[in-house]
Amino acid sequence: MAEAEAARELADAATVPTPEPVAIGEPGAGCPLPWSVRDTPAGVLRERFSDYDGAQPNDPVKAAQAILRAVDDDTSPLRLPLGPEAVTLIRRKLQRQLADLDSWETVSFDTRYPGA
């Protein structure tokens, strides 16, 4: 079930067509990508990372500081969105989930035994 949810979330957030099944590979920096990975959406995205280095809208130093702050704070969230883009995507996802919950609430509640 988690895989299906993750695939749906990836498809919702992806800016390029996303094939199924979805697999995530994370080779280290400078690791050449084999042709089979280079041509996937993840490979294309990874190749673009070098183009954004130093030109990205969010500051990686500030992100690292936020992560360290979260590690030291007992009240930090389970998921720490970093940057306005992350906050916007998470808020959209939660709004969709709330809309689904609201529209199916009656069906969801109507699963009990009579009188329970």
Image: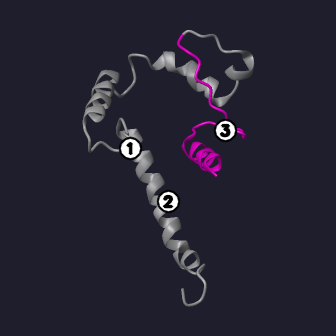
Q: Residues within 10 Å of mark 3 (few under 14, many from 20)?
A: few
49 lies left or right of 23: left
57 lies left or right of 23: left
* Three-letter residue code for mark 2: Arg
Image location (x, y in percent) of residue 85:
40, 39
Q: Residues within 10 Å of mark 2 (few under 14, many from 20)?
A: few
* Three-letter residue code for mark 1: Leu
What secondary structure is marked by label 3? loop
90 or 1: which is nearer to us? 1
Q: Which residue is mark 2?
A: 96
Q: Which residue is mark 1?
A: 78
Q: Residue at (54%, 79%) from the top-left corner?
A: 106
The numbered mark, 3 or 2, whose residue comes first in the sequence reads 3
Q: Residue at (65%, 49%) from the top-left corner?
A: 4
Q: Give the quarter of the image for residue 113.
A: bottom right
Image location (x, y in percent) of residue 81:
37, 40
Asked if residue 5 is positioned above or below residue 81 in the image, the reply reads: below
The numbered mark, 1 or 3, whose residue comes first in the sequence reads 3
